[in-house]
Amino acid sequence: MTGFVYKELKQNLRYILLTVVSGFIPLIVLIMFRDSGETASDFQKLLEIGLIGGLLLAGGMEMAVLNGDDRRLWAYFVSSTSDGYRGFLRVKYEMIFVMSLLFLTSFTLCEQLITAIAADKGMMVESTTSAIAVPLVFIQFLLRSVDIPLFYRFGAKKGNTIKLISVLAIIVVLFTVLLINIDNFEDVYNSVCKAFTEYTRSPLLPAGAVAALAAYYASYRISCRVYLKGAEKYDK
């Protein structure tokens, strides 16, 4: 197991560091464009846009650590080790889990720094964006719960194709529902924003967090079941 951990850290250190950096995107933008923070609202929008951009970058880094794993010879090799492919997959899942927590930690620190900068300019910025980041990170766990088994079962190319088709189908369904309920869009939007910022007062989102972690563990078990089947169909 120690060998797998060392191999993953050495091979994917740049992705781990970029995940940490992704949490500081708002601060980097603020430094690059020093005049972008004229009002408290500007700082708040910078944090919200940085959160979305950072999450997308962090998600890309989490999937990047799987690069090169869809090789038949590698699958045979890890299966012959003392820890087996289950130990290898467990290290992968644990590393991606830690990467998500690193992003959340770095973004929270970034928000505190930007809040301090705004206060130094005489503006009051509410530290609420990191609260929105928490449920979004659990959504990341749900996404990875689907992405990782698809990757190991079908390989990078086929897995991404299946995921793309599924995402497009979901977008079409959501867009259709949105058109049907366009008159109530503002109410729905406000309800979603309220749910994300006040999730600690409602049992729904904490329950969703537990469900996301359960799905993440179930995803690991599924990956263990499909890993060798997928290896037989890898291109290399």
Image (spheres, grey):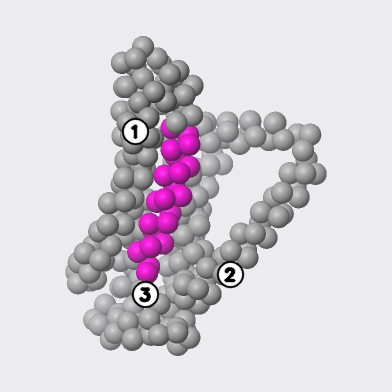
Report, in whole angstroms, how far the alpha carbon at label 2 lies from the one at label 3.
18 Å
Report, in whole angstroms, how far the alpha carbon at label 2 lies from the one at label 1.
38 Å
Instruction: Please report whichever mark, 2 or 1, sits nearer to the chain's N-terminal start.
Output: 1
Amino acid found under the numbered disc labelled 1: Met
Q: Which residue is mark 2?
A: 162
Q: Is residue 162 visible?
A: yes
- Frontmost of labels 2 and 1 is 1
Instruction: Please report whichever mark, 2 or 3, sits nearer to the chain's N-terminal start.
Output: 3
Q: Which mark is residue 32?
A: 1
Labelled pair 2, 1 in contact (Cβ < 8 Å) = no
Q: Which mark is residue 184?
A: none
Q: Which residues are magenta?
A: 47-67
Report, in whole angstroms, how far the alpha carbon at label 3 lies from the one at label 1.
37 Å
Q: Position of residue 81 (x, y in %)?
A: 25, 82
Q: Which residue is mark 3?
A: 69
The extreme top residue here reads: 122
Q: Is residue 59 above or below residue 32?
A: below
Q: Position of residue 73 (x, y in %)?
A: 33, 86
**Element carrying mark 1:** helix
Amino acid found under the numbered disc labelled 2: Ile
Labelled pair 3, 1 in contact (Cβ < 8 Å) = no
Q: Position of residue 38 (x, y in %)?
A: 43, 19
Give left or right: position of 61 versus 167.
Answer: left
